[in-house]
Amino acid sequence: MTELDRLLADNKAAARSHGAVDDARPARRLAVVTCMDARIDALGVLRLQLGDAHVIRNAGGRVTDDVLRSLAISSATFGVDTVVLIQHTGCGLEGTTDQELRERTGAPIEFHAIADHASALRRDVEQVAATPYLSGIASVHGLLLDLRTGVLEEVVSSTRG
């Protein structure tokens, strides 16, 4: 059985108990940006339910052009007014540099490496708060998730008016 066969079989089983959410707008007017790390249950760590939030994932949970694009749609089209950025301990982008990642991958792109979480979160929160087309977002919060304990720590926040 291939991985795809396994996934499709698991989907058939999951579809039997599928609970559809009719409204595309997040019930809690919330967007969560977090890392793609397989150890993170983005809904579970915040005790969110399906339909509560938009969840945007990428390497490091960093604010990139694509995250800004998604947040623009979330806020202008779906009413999101709160953004939570979650980075985590033991991240693969932590303690490395963009240059090291370029050499390792052969990709000539910006990786948004993390020298330290406080600085990275501060920079990302400030970027979201300062982006003019995200004026519908009233608050942005930078959190650090300890993967050993599951506890979130607030590192930085920004609120508008």
Image (tube, rainbow, N blue to C red):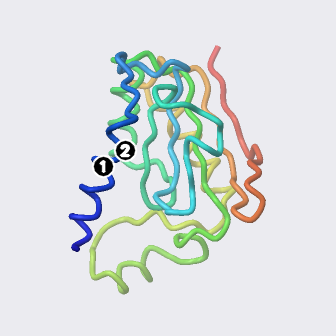
Between 102 and 47, which is closer to the camera in this rendering? 47
Tell me, for residue 19, which label it has, or none.
none
User: Which quadrant of the rendered structure holds the N terminus?
Assistant: bottom left
Provide residue 102's location: percent of width, then percent of height.
35, 79
Identify whether 82 is placed above or below 46: above
- The residue carrying mark 1 is 11
What is the C-alpha distance between the residues marked 2 and 1? 5 Å
Q: State how many labels appear.
A: 2
Provide residue 114's location: percent of width, then percent of height.
57, 66
Name the side, left or right, on which 152 lies relative to 94: right
Q: Residue at x 66, y 24 (%)?
A: 159
> Are the residues tagged 2 and 1 within 8 Å (C-beta)?
yes
User: Could you say whether the residue bearing mark 2 is in a helix, strand or loop?
Assistant: helix
Tell me, for residue 14, which label it has, or none.
2
Q: Amino acid at mark 1?
A: Asn
Q: Amino acid at mark 2?
A: Ala
